[in-house]
Image (tube, grey):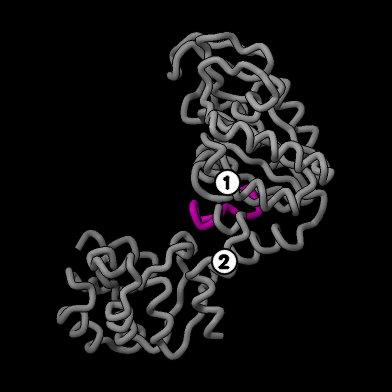
Amino acid sequence: HRRKQPLSAELGKEVVFADDDNVVGEKAKAAAASMNEGDVLLLQNTRYRAEETKNGENFSKELASLADIYVNDAFGTSHRAHSSTVGVASFVPETAVGYLMEKEIEYLGNAVDSPKRPFAAILGGAKVSDKISVINNLLDKVDIILIGGGMAYTFLAAKGYSVGNSLLEEDKIGYAREMMEKADEKGVKFLIPVDSVIAAEFKNDTEFKTAASDAIPEGWQGLDIGSETIRLFEDALKGCKTVVWNGPMGVFEMENFAKGTYAIAKTLSELDAVTIIGGGDSAAAVNKLGFGDKMSHISTGGGASLEFLEGKELPGVAAIQSRN
C-alpha cells in the first residue's frame, strides 16, 4: 500500500492502514483488536466522518474506544475544535501533548508572554483583515512592529498616500490609522515601507521599478518592499533578541518581487536572537529561500500560529491542559 511506505520507513516498522471509510468501523476495530505491543495502526482520514468538524460526541467516543492514552502532536490543527483534536480527549483516561506541540507552545508562548527584548514582530502577507487581532495583541507586547506585503498599502493609504493599483482594503484604512496611533501612544516603533518595488502588471515578466511610498503613480501596483525599506527594516532589527515573523514582504513566488522577503530572511538568519517563523507563507518562503535551518523555530501551524499570536486559547491545547 503506497500510502503507508514513507511512515513505515520513518518508524522502521510496518504501519497497518485501517482502510475504513467509517474511520472507526468494523475494519478499524478488528485491526485495533489484533494489535500486539509495538504495532502501529493508521486510521482513515477523520474527515471521512461529517461529525469530525462538528466535534460530534458519538464520533469522539468511537475514537476514544480504541485507546487508553491520547497524544495530540498536531499543532497545525489545534485551533480547531473537532472530534479528533478536542472531543476525544474527554473520553480517554490519559492525555498529553506531543514533543512538537510542546516545542510550538514553548517558542510561541515564550515569545508572546516573556520575550527577551528588544522584541520585534514582522507582519506581512496580503491583507490587513487577516492580521487585525494579531497587530492589536502584539501592540501590547512588542517594542517594534514592521509592516510589509500587500497589507502595507492600506497603512500607506491611512497616511494619505495614493497607492495606485496596489492591494487596498478601503474599509480597513481607519483601523490602520488607529493602530499607528495606538503604537505611538504605547511607544512602540511602528515601521511601514518608505518605498516599494512597483509593477505595471501582476506578473513576474512585466515592467517594474522602485518608487517612494508617497509617489506611487496611477496604474502601478506595489509587489515588494523597496531597497530603502529593506535598509530601514534591517537597521530596526539589529540588536533585537526576539523576532516573530508572519507573512512575506512581497510576492516572493515571483523572482523579481522576492528581494524584500529574501533580505529579511537573511537578516534574521544572522541575528543573535530567538527567531520564530509563524507558519503558512512565511515558513514556505524561508524554506524556499534556503534559510530554514538558520531559524530558531519554524511553526508548523498557519491558522494555529496566527491565533496563538492573537492571544486566543487554542481548543486542542486547552482540551489536554484541562485534563492534566
Residue 259 shown left or right of residue 23 in the figure: right
In the rendering, at what x and y percent does residue 120 appear? 74, 45
Residue placed most toward the observer, 48 or 234: 48
Residue drawn at 41 percent across, 71 percent down? 85
Residue 313 image label: 2
How many other residues sit within 10 Å of disc 2, few (<14), some (14-19) or many (≥20)?
few
Q: Is residue 296 magenta-colored?
A: yes
Residue drawn at 18 percent across, 78 percent down? 25
Residue 292 image label: 1
- Rendered-image quadrant of the C terminus: bottom right
- State the extent of the magenta-drawn residues as a range: 293-305
Name the kind of residue labelled 2 in the image: Glu
Name the kind of residue labelled 1 in the image: Gly
Decide: is 143 above or below 77: above
In the rendering, at what x and y percent does residue 56 appear? 31, 74
Secondary structure, mark 1, is helix
In the rendering, at what x and y percent does residue 135 appear? 65, 46
Q: Is residue 105 magenta-colored?
A: no
Residue 146 found in image quarter: top right
Residue placed most toward the observer, 37 or 80: 80
Residue 35 shown left or right of residue 172 in the figure: left
Residue drawn at 27 percent across, 86 percent down? 35
In the rendering, at what x and y percent does residue 87 appear? 39, 77
Residue drawn at 50 percent across, 8 percent down? 207
